Amino acid sequence: MLSTAQQEKTRINIQLSAGIKNRLSQASTREGKNVSTLVRESIEEKLMQLDRKDLEARMQAAYQDLAEENIRICEDFKFSDAENLPEVAP
């Protein structure tokens, strides 16, 4: 994957409240990064979180499907477990 510096860049315009803009400016100063870099990194981090959340949801659905299939298989074979056991005299 190309680094952010190597990727083609495009400009977007966003609107922020004055309070958010001020907090963003303060955070960029604290972090020693320009505002664009801080915003880009924040967006990348949020997108990774969303991707991870989507993956977890798909994994959970697949696990649930597999669990339901396993239950059906167990039901199909529930009586075969004891077929080869010797009879126990009372």
Image (cartoon, rainbow, N blue to C red):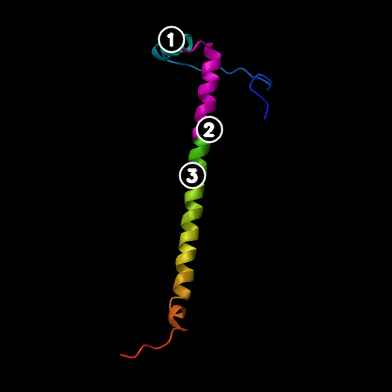
Q: Amino acid at mark 2?
A: Met
Residue at numbered disc 3: 56
Q: Earlier in the sequence, mark 2 or mark 3?
A: 2
Q: Amino acid at mark 3?
A: Glu
Mark 3 is surrounded, within 10 Å at the Cα level, by few (under 14), some (14 to 19) or many (20 or more) other residues, namely few
Residue at numbered disc 1: 26
Q: Quadrant of the N terminus?
A: top right
Q: Residue at x 51, y 27 (%)?
A: 45
On the image, the x and y values in percent for residue 84 come to 47, 84
The range drawn in magenta is 31-49
Does residue 48 appear left or right of residue 2 in this picture?
left
User: Marks 3 and 1: in contact by CB < 8 Å?
Assistant: no
Q: Quadrant of the C terminus?
A: bottom left
On the image, the x and y values in percent for residue 24 come to 45, 13
Q: Is residue 48 magenta?
A: yes
Residue at numbered disc 2: 48
Depicted 61 relative to depicted 23: above or below? below
Give SS at disc 2: helix
